[in-house]
């Protein structure tokens, strides 16, 4: 006998964030080509010493047990929860999305409110939302994940795998291209994203002071750089 599909709640967005990283060092791992196995090993070593780790999209492939996993795209969650390892119950309570649509309950994804401004989006002028739990889209899960971790009061926040550039010499991600018809970054989208980061850092300087970029060769220049 066929079982009924699990229906999403009428509105499953959380009203308050269930995590508190106040004063903790946090590393956010994105999936740029610079996020090598060597970089991942360093992140895991830091995590073993108490650093909190948030992965963005496919960066989870190199971090076996992150503290949080962020991806906006609901189709991405459906794909990786059914065909990948993210359906494992050990990840329950760690999967987060700011997708505007309801997400089926069985995926185990916590949905935070997300928002954007079409005119600011086109002008490269998006900025982080300062009041939790809302995140600003800016067309980037990495931008949203950083907004989320800022809400969690982590300090400092270290970026890894945030290359934010695309050229003809290398793949857009450390694993190549997204399969299954998912979109991949372009030179135009990365240029817009750099503008969003620049604007966000300028509009919220207190947040900028908490962020460090440990991505080798990153095109993001609005944050102080550090070695991982």
Image: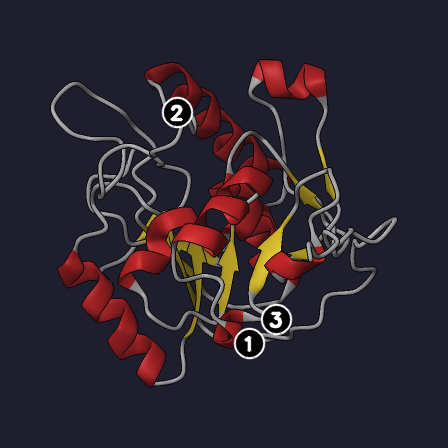
Q: Quadrant of residue 150?
A: bottom right
Q: Taking the image as drawn, is residue 85 in sight?
A: yes
Compare marks 2 and 3 and give the one earlier in the sequence. 3
Question: Of tags 1 and 2, which is closer to the observer?
Answer: 2
Relative to 175, is 21 on the left or the right?
right
Which numbered dot is residue 93? 3
Which numbered dot is residue 23? 1
Discs 2, 3 touching: Cβ within 8 Å: no
Q: Quadrant of residue 95?
A: bottom right
Q: Distance between the residues labelled 3 and 1?
A: 21 Å
Q: Position of residue 194 (x, y in %)?
A: 43, 28
User: What residue is pinned by disc 2?
Assistant: 190
Q: Where is residue 116 in the image (x, y as percent from the top left)?
A: 70, 30
Query: The residue tagged with tag 1: helix, strand or loop?
Result: loop
Q: In this view, does 58 lie above or below 51?
A: above
Crowding at label 3, few (<14), some or many (≥20) Cα neighbours within 10 Å? some
Discs 3, 1 touching: Cβ within 8 Å: no
Q: Where is residue 165 in the image (x, y as percent from the top left)?
A: 29, 28
At x 34%, y 33%, the residue is: 179
Crowding at label 1, few (<14), some or many (≥20) Cα neighbours within 10 Å? few
Q: Residue furthest front?
A: 1
Is 106 or 5 nearer to us in this picture? 5
Compare marks 3 and 1 and give the one earlier in the sequence. 1
Is 171 or 107 nearer to us in this picture? 107
The quadrant of the rendering that contains the C terminus is: bottom left
Question: Of tags 3 and 1, which is closer to the observer?
Answer: 3
Q: How far apart are marks 1 and 2 (CA)?
A: 30 Å
Query: The residue tagged with tag 3: helix, strand or loop?
Result: loop
């Amino acid at each position: 006998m066929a079982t009924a599909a699990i229906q999403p709640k009428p509105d499953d967005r959380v009203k308050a964030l269930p995590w508190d990283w106040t004063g903790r060092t946090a590393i956010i791992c994105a999936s740029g080509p610079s996020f090598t196995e060597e970089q991942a090993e360093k992140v895991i070593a830091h995590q073993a010493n108490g650093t909190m780790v948030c992965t963005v999209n496919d960066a989870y492939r190199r971090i076996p047990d992150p503290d949080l996993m962020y991806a906006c795209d609901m189709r991405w969650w459906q794909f990786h929860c059914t065909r990948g390892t993210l359906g494992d119950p050990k990840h329950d309570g760690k999967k987060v999305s700011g997708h505007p649509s309801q997400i089926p309950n069985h995926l185990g994804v916590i949905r935070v409110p997300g928002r954007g401004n079409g005119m600011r989006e086109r002008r490269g002028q998006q900025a982080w939302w300062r009041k939790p739990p809302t995140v600003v889209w800016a067309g980037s899960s990495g931008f949203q994940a950083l907004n989320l971790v800022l809400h969690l009061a982590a300090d400092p926040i270290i970026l890894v795998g945030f290359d934010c550039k695309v050229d003809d010499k290398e793949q857009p991600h450390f694993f190549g291209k997204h399969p299954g018809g998912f979109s991949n970054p372009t030179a135009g989208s990365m240029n817009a994203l750099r503008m969003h980061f620049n604007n966000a850092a300028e509009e919220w300087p207190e947040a900028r002071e908490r962020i460090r970029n440990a991505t080798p060769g990153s095109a993001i220049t609005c944050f102080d750089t550090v070695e991982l």
